[in-house]
Amino acid sequence: MNTTFIAILAILSYLASSLIIGFRLFSKNVRWSLSRQGGITLGLIGVALHSVVLYQTMFTDNGLNLGIFNAASLAAWIIILALMLSAISKPVENLGIVLLPLAAVALILELIFPSHYIFDPSSPWGLRIHAIVSLLAYSLFSMAAVQASLLAIQDRHLHNRHPGGFVRALPPLQTMEALLFEMIIIGFILLSIGLLSGFMFLENMFTQHLAHKTVLSIASWLVFGTLLWGRFQFGWRGRTAIKWTMAGFFALMLAYFGSKAVVELVLTGN
């Protein structure tokens, strides 16, 4: 089947899922179990269609195409897959209001701007582990950043004593914080493995084209490590946790996609 047609179906599924989840979240009637299941189902349908698009665009005869827009699309796919599977047993589907449209945008960019950055199939297995684990860490921290944004909105409404329908539809503040730190802990472990595998299997992590990526990744690792230390040592929570989470995420975003943009779009274009 045509890749563009499948991608359009995936985009529509993502957007429909986001609309259903959003309507349920912002509606005064928050007891819509059917709409919750419908949103999750449509999200999973979008993930299935998205996986077909990724297979057709990433796996080439010359190797794995991990160009910047393909990588962004893959990261979006991992994020939505993890989100939808988690939503089956945990109240995290509200993150889809932001993440599902972003996944749709990633697919659109992949279609409009096909990129070619071939990952040699003969490369060592350690480098493949490094690439996959790093992408998983980025995806999980992306979810944590959106969770932190929702937590900030919830915290502000509760402090101002204006818990509207949107805030009432969210899980309790303690549950939201617990979910946030679950994501951060797993993401921190994956980022640690990604950095360790990079130092083990790359000849020099501080070469010219990798230096800024390495420095920013280490900075992000230190930020999240400090946040976890503060959480378990001093009980950091609320706005402190939100600020540290967003700082660590932006550093990691610049490390991965900022470096890919410079290498593939700026340097190649010159």
Image: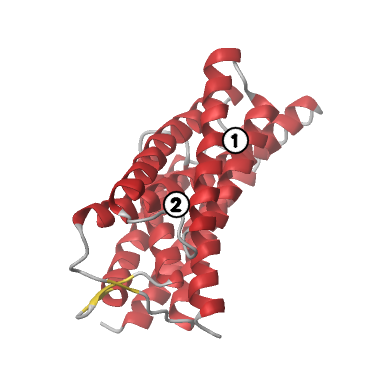
Q: Is residue 67 above or below residue 245?
A: below
**On-image quarter of the N terminus:** bottom left
Q: Which mark is residue 213?
A: none
Residue, disc 2 = 39
The total of numbered circles placed on residues is: 2
Q: Can residue 53 be seen at all in this image of the molecule? A: yes
Point 48% across, 30% down: residue:
179
Q: Is residue 87 visible?
A: no
Residue 230 place in picture, x, y as percent: 58, 21
Q: Which mark is residue 169?
A: 1
Instruction: Identify the amino acid type marked 2.
Output: Gly
Q: Where is residue 54 in the image (x, y as percent from the top left)?
A: 32, 69
What colour scheme was applied to this rendering of the protein?
Answer: secondary structure
Q: Measured along the vertical axis of the image, is residue 116 above or below residue 83? A: below
Asked whether 152 or 45 is in front, the reply is 152
Q: Residues within 10 Å of mark 1 (few under 14, many from 20)?
A: some
The image shows residue 72, relative to residue 35, as above or below, that is below
165 vs 73, nearest the viewer: 73
Q: In which quarter of the image is residue 59?
A: bottom left
Type of amino acid at the residue the image marks with label 1? Ala
Task: Establish if 262 lies above or below 161.
Answer: below
Q: Which residue is drawn at 56% across and 42% down?
A: 219
- Proximity of marks 2 and 1: CB atoms separated by less than 8 Å: no
Question: Which residue is drawn at the image coordinates 35% and 42% (left, top)?
Answer: 196
Q: Which residue is drawn at 46% across and 55% down?
A: 206
Q: In which quarter of the image is the C terminus?
A: bottom right
- Tell me the element at label 1: helix
9 vs 109, nearest the viewer: 109
Residue 3, image x, y percentages? 32, 80
Q: Going by the picture, which residue comes out furthest to the right?
A: 160
Q: List x then y, in percent, for residue 200.
A: 30, 46
